Image (spheres, coloured by chain):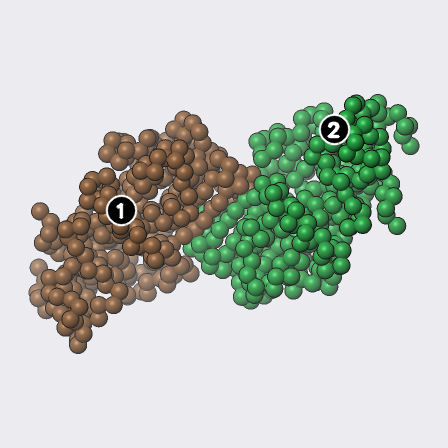
Chain colours: A brown, B green
Amino acid sequence: MMSNDTMKRIVLASRPDGPPTPDNFRLEELPMPAPGPGEILVRTIWLSLDPYMRGRMDAGPSYAAPVEIGATMEGGCVGQVIESNNPDFSVGDFVDHRFGWCTHGVSDGKGLRKLDPEVAPLSANLGVLGMPGMTAYAGLNIHGRPKEGETLVVGAATGAVGTMVGQLAKAQGLRVVGVAGGPEKCAYATETLGFDACLDHRAASTPHDLRVAMGEACPDGVDIYFENVGGKTLEAVLPLMNTFGRIPICGVISWYNAGGLGEGASEGQNHLPRTWRAILVKRLSVRGFIVTDHYDQFPEFLDLVGPMVKDGRIQYRETIAEGLESAPQALISLLEGGNFGKQLVAVSEDPTRK
Amino acid sequence: MMSNDTMKRIVLASRPDGPPTPDNFRLEELPMPAPGPGEILVRTIWLSLDPYMRGRMDAGPSYAAPVEIGATMEGGCVGQVIESNNPDFSVGDFVDHRFGWCTHGVSDGKGLRKLDPEVAPLSANLGVLGMPGMTAYAGLNIHGRPKEGETLVVGAATGAVGTMVGQLAKAQGLRVVGVAGGPEKCAYATETLGFDACLDHRAASTPHDLRVAMGEACPDGVDIYFENVGGKTLEAVLPLMNTFGRIPICGVISWYNAGGLGEGASEGQNHLPRTWRAILVKRLSVRGFIVTDHYDQFPEFLDLVGPMVKDGRIQYRETIAEGLESAPQALISLLEGGNFGKQLVAVSEDPTRK
């Protein structure tokens, strides 16, 4: 147990070479910060773990600056105000914040959103009603441009993003085929999330096997491939893309640990020429996007999806790691597909959770 | 010389394995066809040779059916009506047609467009005012979405498409950087076409050299990469793409002869992961397109570009091979970059040419 006058955080100790290891992280204990005039002190309840964090651990250029060595790991969180010198926030208020991998933080309140636990469980604000949900919503609707009767494929089907992509697409009348790791996840995708089919990429011993299974699951081809994994899923889908198909790219998790150089795809081949040729011949639209580019649509996303979560039309699962100390191993596991649904860290007690 | 009662054509004799060779083609002499009721007989004056023809020689699926073994090679042509049983056409009319690699053809006139030699030289209807010009226009404006002050890169800069892309972009206030093979073409691109810079890919002995030169030529990065070559030009441009950049793909000529497997790009590496990651991180739009998808805009294209050709604001060059028999070697050369400007075959006399 931690005393009341210290807080904990996890910093980036060193940059990984390939998959992260526990020694890339370091737990630190610091004096508890005191909120100044106009500031609030927040204790973190839930920390979100997401695949993009792997990218932040590298030094190379990306859409966001890397985490510096010795700096707190970044991350989205839900917390509760425990001290307030700010008239806009009362002690007990729930807020989302981005203090990162730490137990407490001080803020002037700017950019913090108050959360109503009656609308949805607090943790849902980090999943279906948070960044991953908005990623699914923006990618599907803005860049995927779905039409009733079309076929959509999404990888990491039971992950935070895939779960939402598939269910939002089903609600719009699409055929939805997921790809996930293991029979349990695949059963959940079809039985609980309502996907039309879900392929187990671990059961496919070669990229060719997955391609054959994908062909059987998509008899009318693929109109939207919601790209969040890359690797052999991309390889399997590409030949099935229909003319004028769309490929929104929000991530390439299977490649994150590979230093950008292609494990997962068939070895020893340059897949770019045939990919480029498929884009040409099939007149595909391939579009990278980052959810923050579309945060102007966050209110309309919440208006649409909030009620769907509340009344159960949107289902989701969570994998919860207990305690801030468990975050490094939970991220390592997430990057290997070890999570089942949204990966969270329970940093402190959620008083609204039964 | 051919007698008046026979015509010639060139058929696909066999499918190439890699670059085409002369024995993939066969010259045939046939009886001259006679136009039936409502039909016209046309002699071909100009035959257009274009990179897409390489794709038609393969058996694999593409956006158009392959040419069958023993069938006439496809191609766009300009010709003159020499017999008419159709009240819409008079002997002496000039028309564009798609009879392919042959000296004569019969048509009911459907789909044939009459050409006015006062608007532009007849051959221009196969280049700047024809399919390649329209490819440039549609790719640049619909998929490239150019804005004044942006930087555009185009490969095969002095080819039929590149010539137009660059000049249309210059007219809209963009910085234009071309890539071409050899100092003569590069000088033409900057001195006659008005490009801001043109890089000689033959002078760059490694992909790295070209990348360095490209970086120097594009100090503000690249907003539009008009993709018609693939290979090391793509490799050089990709790291320079700006956020929200656009990559319209109309062709990948450097890969056409490689059976889809990557000569031109650095050997022994899978370039797909880093390409996919760049699309994500930079939020690029990559869009394949085929000019025929946009032929509804052909009239507005002619309205805009016709006057620019007539008054010299659009410059262009032609490489002319003499006689139908020269077409196979001219196509082989075109695929190696041997042409300088639009590649044509002079099949018979052009009475309008001085």
Residue type for callout 1: Val
Residue B27's quadrant in the figure? top right
Query: Which SS class for mark 1?
Result: helix
Quarter of the image that includes the N terminus of chain B: top right
* B296 vs A3, nearest the viewer: B296
Residue A61, percent across and down?
42, 61
* B336 vs B191, nearest the viewer: B191
* Left or right position of A238 against B217: left
Query: Which SS class for mark 2?
Result: loop
Residue A268, percent across and down?
49, 41
Inspect this view and state whether residue A72 appears: yes
Neighbor class of circle 1 (other Cα within 10 Å; few <14, some 14-19, many 20+) is many
Give the labeled residue for mark 1: A305
Q: Relative to A240, is B283 above or below? A: below
- In space, the residues marked 2 and 1 are separated at their CA atoms by 58 Å
- Chain letter for the residue marked with disc 2 in the picture: B
Give the labeled residue for mark 2: B108
